[in-house]
Structures are given as C-alpha cells and as structure tokens.
Image: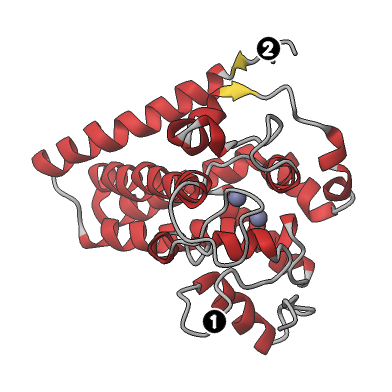
Amino acid sequence: MGQTKYSLDYLTIVLFAAVTLATVVGVPLFGYFHGFSAVDWAMLGILYVVSGLGITVGYHRLVAHRSFECPEWVKACLLVAGGWALENSALRWCADHIRHHARCDQEEDPYNATKGFWYSHCGWIFIKSPHRDEKYELRLRKDRVVMWQHRWYVPIVLSGLALPFVIGLVNGGWMGGLSCFLLAGICRTFLVLNSTFCINSICHLWGSQPHGTFDSSRDSWFISLLTFGEGYHNYHHTYLRDYRNGPKWYNFDPSKWLIYSLSLVGLAYNLQRQKS
Ligand SMILES: [Zn+2]
Ligand SMILES: [Zn+2]
C-alpha cells in the first residue's frame, strides 16, 4: 500500500498562527499595558456563546446530522453565527464531519484520532486532505441556505470580527475598538476553535464508552462544559441523529436546551430522539 500524499494548506497555517500568536502574546501584553473594559469582556462572553452554539446547533446538529428542522431564516441565523467561528463554511465543515462519522479512525477520517492528540486536535487543518470527496457534499449542496452561507462565507467571517471592533469603537474610541477586537474577535475565535478541537481530540482519546466500543469516541462530561454539551461524544457516535448529545436531563448540554427551547416557540420541529 503506497503512502497517501498530503500537501500543506498555507492559508490555514498562516491564519491559525496569526490567531494563536495574537491570543497568547498580543492579548496579555495589551491587557498589561492598556487593560480591557467590561464591554470587552461582555462581548467575549456573548460572542463565545453565539459562535459556539452556531457551530454545535447550526453546523453540527442541524446541517450535518439533520437532528431537527427549522425555518430557513433561523437556519440562516445559526449558520451566520457558526461562520463567525472561522471553522470553514457549513458546506465544508459538515462534509468533513459526515466523513468523520462514516470513516471514523480510518485513513479517510479527517481528524483521525489514531494519529495522536495533536493531529486530531489541530494538525489535520494544516493539510489539504486528498480524501475530500464530493459524495459527502451531495445532500448539503441541495440546501439553498447552506449554499448561500458558503457563497458569503468570507463577508460573514469579516462581519464577526468587525462587530466587536465597532462596539469597542463606540464604547472607547480607536483603542476601545482595538481592545474589543483583540479580546472578543481574535481571542474568542481562538477559544471557540480549541473548544471544537477538543471534541475531535480529547473525546476520542480519554473518557468512558458506555454506549459501545465500535470506534474511539468517548463521553467526557468535563469537555461538555466547554463545548455546549458536545462532550457526550460516545452517545453521539452511537445515536447520530439525536438532537441531544447528553440524553439525560441532568447532562450539561446547552445545545439541546436551545433546540428544545426553539421547539417550544415553533422555531424548531421534528426533533429526532433515540427511542429508549
Ligand atoms: Zn457528529
Ligand atoms: Zn467524533
């Protein structure tokens, strides 16, 4: 069997390096010499929740797994919020994710955990996978909201960075704009990226497997605290379409709570549940 050829994705490497450096070096230095305002911290919290839920509820449970349905405008809002996380368009993200479930722990698995922690955490984004296959996009391409978000992905990303800058600008002039951009734009992006990465790395390496050992997926209640409920990953790999990742009422799963809350006001329907 020949070695698979991988080529580097330089744009992603530069972007990720810039976001990481700005967060681990720029943010502490700026905080030390200038400080951050209460508005900056509030925007960090708000945008962390909004873009994080955009990924878990919009990209993951709605588009990739069809675990519920909703009006198109609600889907559009969720996909804009998910776009702000800088994790690629929903079309690309969900095609990769569908391939992850279809080929888990195999060479074609985009974040193959058998290649170790760093590969499944973030190493995989630095290479252009030769295993991308249009067959994983076919269903997604029929969704006009997904295609709309894919077309407008770059402006959506820029709007997610411009928003904290403008709010900071109004709050505290140019330096206020810069500080809010750094904390709620760049640092927040770094945090949400790593929260998603933890599901692909930690939740395939450490934790319990109460629902089966057919693949490396694991349940980790602790990671659920950081990822809006996605840490119950062994359950999720077993019951893909369930709108809940933590099925018990006491499982910390804010994504499930948001979907259920939307259903109470008619903005989500046909919620999928594993019959038990
Ligand atoms: Zn999934
Ligand atoms: Zn997984």
The front one of 32 and 108 is: 108
Task: Give me the C-alpha separation between circle 2 and circle 1.
Answer: 44 Å
Q: Mark 2 or mark 1: which comes first in sequence?
A: 2
Q: Quarter holding the N terminus?
A: top right
Q: Amino acid at mark 2?
A: Gln
Q: Disc 2 beta carbon < 8 A from ligand 2?
A: no
The residue lying at 82 percent from left, 42 percent from top is: 137
Measured along the vertical axis of the image, is residue 114 above or below residue 98? above
Q: Amino acid at mark 1?
A: Lys
Measured along the vertical axis of the image, is residue 8 above or below residue 65? above
Q: Residues within 10 Å of mark 1 (few under 14, many from 20)?
A: few
Residue 195 image offset from top left, x and y in percent: 44, 51
- Secondary structure under badge 2? loop
Residue 198 image offset from top left, x and y in percent: 45, 48
The residue lying at 53 percent from left, 24 percent from top is: 126
Q: Can you identify the residue that label 2 sits on?
A: 3
- Contact, CB < 8 Å: mark 2 with mark 1? no
Q: Quarter holding the C terminus?
A: bottom right
The image quarter in which residue 74 lies: bottom right
The residue lying at 73 percent from left, 22 percent from top is: 130
The front one of 236 and 127 is: 236
Q: Can you identify the residue that label 1 sits on?
A: 248
Q: Left or right: 244 with respect to 27?
A: right
